[in-house]
Image (cartoon, rainbow, N blue to C red):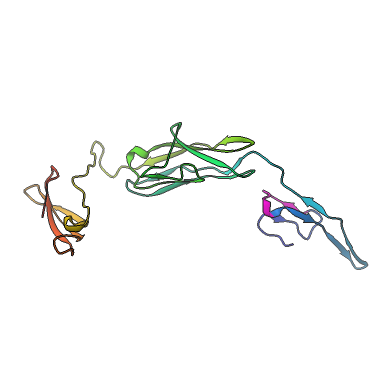
Amino acid sequence: MTDGGNVFGSTTRTLTVSNASPSNVGAYSVMVSNVAGTATSTEAFLTIVPWRPFITEQPAGRSVLPGETMTLSVTAVGSQPMHYQWRKNGGDLADDEYLSGAAAGVLSIHNVSYAHAGTYSVFVSNTLGTTTSSDALLTVTSVTAPGVAMTTLCSFTGGAEGGNPNGLVQGVNGIFYGTTQHGGTNLAGGVFQVTTSGLLRW
């Protein structure tokens, strides 16, 4: 053996295996030598007894912008199988169009919105018990001035209606003008205008 990972002291009288895992299970012996000869110990067998979950890495709080994809993760050790249940503000979460991994070690939130802000935690359990992580605060940073809210004027679905719009320019008449990268009459992009009430014209 050599030192590395969670193994230390492979050339000393004391061998240390920290945070033991199933890969460390096995028979261990030591060979002791000097100028007069060599002696080998009897084998000592390392096994891992069943144990309840223990969290080794807590989920960390995050601050993200609207529309980003973010993840919260937890690392736990214990007897398998282990089960996970993520919670937000004390209520259980379930996978939906925005959330995935609500019952896994990594929770992903796609297209983050202000509604996703809150305090997240996770239950980790096996047949021997349950442990709960510390709280992780998710903050969604505003991209507008205080008192100003963003809203969707219109959506582009591709095809003849256009898709992947570029930036907008507001004319003196108050109407927004822009272009799309795809879609349109010839499926090569197009020019559009949209009013502040959401009326879209090509």
Farthest bottom residue?
35
User: On the rendered structure, is 185 left or right of 126?
Assistant: left
Asked whether residue 160 is in view, the answer is yes
Rendered view: 71 above or below 3: above
The residue lying at 7 percent from left, 50 percent from top is 172
The image shows residue 175 at horizontal and vertical percentages of 10, 49
The residue lying at 72 percent from left, 43 percent from top is 49
Farthest right residue?
36
Farthest top residue?
90
User: On the rendered structure, is 195 left or right of 110?
Assistant: left
The image shows residue 103 at horizontal and vertical percentages of 49, 42
User: On the rendered structure, is 140 left or right of 38?
Assistant: left
The image shows residue 38 at horizontal and vertical percentages of 89, 65
The image shows residue 84 at horizontal and vertical percentages of 53, 40
The residue lying at 81 percent from left, 52 percent from top is 44
Which segment is the magenta one? Answer: 15-23
Whether the magenta-drawn stretch holds residue 88 is answered as no
Placement of the N terminus among the 4 image quadrants = bottom right
Placement of the C terminus among the 4 image quadrants = bottom left
Asked whether residue 165 is in view, the answer is no
How many numbered markers are drawn?
0
